[in-house]
Amino acid sequence: MIAQLLGPKAQQRDLLIENLHVVQDHFGHLDKESITALAEVMRLSQAQVYEVASFYAHFHLNGPPAPQQSCVSLTCAMFGVGKGAPVPCVGRCAEAPVSLPRAQKSPPDYIDYAAYDYTTYRQYKGQSDQVLHALEAANLRGLGGAGFKVADKWRFFDKATNAVLVINADEGEPGTFKDRHCLERNPHKVIEGALIAADVINAKDIYIYLRDEYADIRQILQIELPKIDTDGRVIHLRRGAGAYICGEETALLESLEGKRGLPRIKPPYPAQQGLFGRPTLINNVETLWRVQDILQNGIEAGSKRFYSLSGRIQKPGVYEAPLTITAQELITHYGGGLLDGHKFKAYLPGGASGGILPAYLANLPLGFGQLEQYGCFIGSAAVIVLSDHDNMKTVCTNLLDFFNHESCGQCTPCRVGCDKLSNMLRHTLDTDLAQELCAVMRDSSICGLGQAAPNPLLSALTYFAEDFT
Ligand SMILES: Cc1cc2nc3c(=O)[nH]c(=O)nc-3n(C[C@H](O)[C@H](O)[C@H](O)COP(=O)(O)O)c2cc1C
Ligand code: SF4
């Protein structure tokens, strides 16, 4: 039965997560019998299947999932969490508070293949130098969080053979929903950017790692991908399974290989040894969107990015604005100002990881490298606005609970540190002890999750010490 469900690729090891989805979609959950049968069909041990299935929040080993889910991440929490099973940020912060039915939503209107034109790809095909010069001139940096210069990253693949391109569409940072905005409206623009990247690094395989919550986008891509002339390249669409850590590039590679999303120790870097040991370029959805935009519309297009704006404002949403805009300008010109009866108190410039700044620092440009001296960073440009109705201890408890829930548990400073901070915040906080713990987490965690988890608490202690007494 399971072998029939899975079809001819049933034994492909890297498809374990895909196969778990197929089995769960069919039976409603994953019981002991289906795990045993899947292990047999895939010629894996039951432990191998179980350790993967139990790592991901979207695999239900103890019966079917709750019919309704409510997001408990910061933006939703400030508007009152609804009924249903608690889930972390679902990438719909403009609609907060969000409760989701399990049923798939129908896809929104989007620019389909017939309405799109791959002229830019055709124009730049085989013109790597021109592409790299344009991206350099535009000073394009990665928009997934780390802000690495795109042209520099692509140049690592100069002499690489057998390279792979991965599109990071995992978008799990609380407050971030701009990649959803791109893919729901103009998926071919992202794919065209990816084809340009694949041409420059000579990649024959392109993987899209799409977060499981974006079922509507999965539907769009399933319809649209087969229509594209990829010049012989294969585009593989892979479905995440509810793990924020899989947005981290090396955890993502593990997940694509059908394993638990445990970040790898670097080096080797993905460009040296990535997916299946092959040189791998990983770029964020919006980064590839911008690549296409710069080549089509000129380097000026590189001076903008999408901001996911949410929280205590009149008009939350995704707004395209200059890299140098300030939070105050974003709130006033795009967000329609604060909600009635609210006074601007603080903002998170880069989601849960990027720290918290007070309203009196809302006139700082939000560009790369501008906020570090204030203990923050722009990251994925998820700007969450807080007001005098928000207590910073409560805010930090919410954020630390998120990191604690999402830590992969692989390294002690992060696993124990997130748990301890989250507990300490529920009592009178010993700030010296908390700061010491934060320093250990920053210095000795394996990946960016554990290193950045202390950010909101450290900045809140700097700017809002009174909220912790
Ligand atoms: C915990 C963690 C989660 C991350 N989540 C995402 C994500 O959801 N999407 C993303 O593009 N990058 C995410 N990143 C950054 C990626 O590791 C990587 O830097 C990025 O995908 C590279 O693409 P870019 O250079 O185009 O920004 C995350 C990093 C960390 C440490
Ligand atoms: S820092 Fe946290 S998420 Fe990253 S590897 Fe360590 S335990 Fe896992």
Image: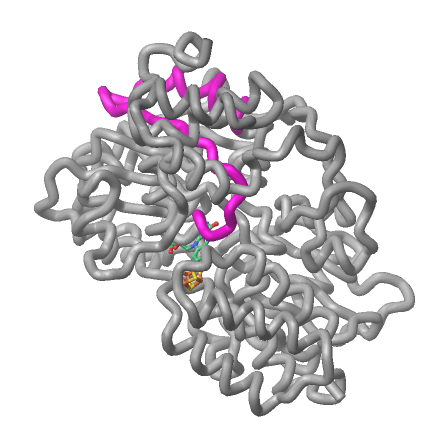
Which quadrant would residue 181 be assigned to in this image? Answer: top right
**Left or right of 323: which side holds 333?**
right
Q: Residue at x 73, y 84 (%)?
A: 428
Specify whether residue 238 is painted magenta.
yes
> Would you say residue 100 sits in the magenta stretch?
no
Tell me which corner region of the image, top left, top right, bottom left or bottom right, holds residue 41. top left
Q: How many marks?
A: 0
Residue placed at 49% from the left, 17% from the top? 223
Picture coordinates of residue 441, whole percent (x, y): 45, 75
Q: Is residue 126 left or right of residue 341?
A: left
Examine the rendering and report whether any part of residue 220 can be seen.
Answer: no
Residue for point 72% across, 57% down: 75
Residue 348 showing in the rendered view: yes
**Res. 423 image quadrant:** bottom right
Considering only vertical position in the picture, is 251 above or below 114? below
Q: Out of 295 and 45, give the one closest to the viewer.
A: 45
User: Where does the magenta region start and end?
Assistant: 218-246
Q: Residue at x 51, y 46 (%)?
A: 243
Q: Residue 355: where, in percent of width, then height?
A: 57, 72
